Amino acid sequence: MTAILVLEDGRVFPGEGFGAEGVCTGEIVFNTSMTGYQEILTDPSYHRQIVTMTVPHVGNTGVNLEDPESEKVWVAGFVVRSLSPIVSNWRNRGDLGSYLKDNGVIGVSSVATRALVRHIREIGVMRAAVAHGPKAEDTDMLVDIARSSLDMSGANLVDDVTVRAPYDWREASDSQWYGEHRTQAERPLIVAYDFGIKRNILRMMTDRGLRVKVVPAWMPPAEVLGMKPAGVFLSNGPGDPAAVDYAIANVRALLGEAPIFGICLGHQILALALGGETEKMRFGHRGGNQPVKHLASGEVEIAAHNHGFAVSAESGLNGGEITHLNLNDNTVAGLRHRELRAFSVQYHPEASPGPHDSFYLFDEFVDAVRSR
């Protein structure tokens, strides 16, 4: 044993370390995606979380230059059952262990991940500590560190991940993966609030003929409206949505001024701005295989999720309506306010990683923007 995962309830999971050495803390969560670990590692929504993959074999495709969803690895730690000793992929530019080491992130392999995931599902997510190196032998110290670490409830982590200054996004997606892009003579401006935004979301909007300006999470609504946007986008991000009070107030001031589309944390912030409430989930939804029902059509989409909070189904939305439900537990997966021209989903239609069933949501946003 060269590494160990310790939970705040005292449960210990030994393993073999890879990546960086040292000690880290975070909320222990699991992801059920079969592929796409590089996108998961670089998703800012995983800030301050230790991610466990339920797929047993990880690392066989290595890492590449195309798949990162941000400029760095955001997970606090990475736990797998089996780390592949062989890397083989035509886009490969390096191995997973070296990638984590270069980014200062601890990995633990040879962990009994099935037992770990069953424990999380029964007890719920909790704080944890990971150690790789000499300190892995001091389990009592690691339990104390886990118990004194950050509690995700009430945590505003958006301040850690948001961009510091506005910038223009111009990169489109690779047509070999998503097909040809829309070409429009008129390119409406979208202002995208960065609460921890993923690159593929930006590509999806660029593909559809939109100009995108990404702005800090704290930008006042007057400055946003001063740019004369045709629409406003609210991004994904980490932490407790109710703790990002300035974002809730800003979105409330923007309601009715332009069409609004929110994803994940952006969905939760929109609900809070409408007068709704959010709640901490027992172990959340994380993976590329969640069934979501579109209530108006009755159709079921398989969608990618990554969230530990949800909009309360009992909360009022002041004229808004629930549009989608997660069929695993009937939690709210989408909402719309027709009069205020705002809608959002809890899941990730940009599908990175994940299926493409929900691309139509970006088309609906473009239609709302252009009809304005």
Image (cartoon, rainbow, N blue to C red):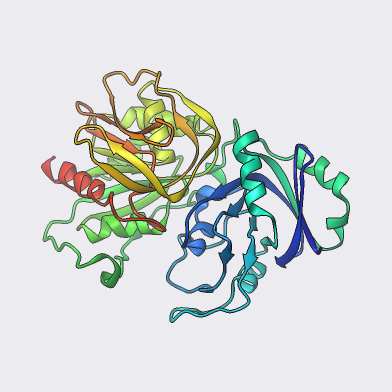
Q: Is residue 65 above or below residue 218?
A: below
| Image position, residue 27 (x, y; %) | 64, 43
Nearer-the-camera pick, 218 or 245: 245
Give residue 128's quadrant in the image.
top right
Q: Left of 368 or right of it: where is 163?
A: right
Q: Is residue 86 above or below residue 326?
A: below
Nearer-the-camera pick, 316 or 324: 324
| Image position, residue 371 (x, y; %) | 11, 42
Residue in the image at 43% along x and 32% along y = 329
- Of the 4 image quadrants, the one containing the N terminus is bottom right
| Image position, residue 279 (x, y; %) | 51, 27
Q: Left of 304 or right of it: where is 108?
A: right
Nearer-the-camera pick, 169 or 66: 66
Nearer-the-camera pick, 211 or 68: 68
Give residue 3's quadrant in the image.
bottom right
Count the labels in the image. 0
Q: Is residue 97 above or below residue 147?
A: below
Residue in the image at 37% along x and 36% along y = 327
| Image position, residue 158 (x, y; %) | 52, 42
Q: Is residue 228 visible?
A: no
Q: Is residue 18 visible?
A: yes
- Of the 4 image quadrants, the one containing the C terminus is top left
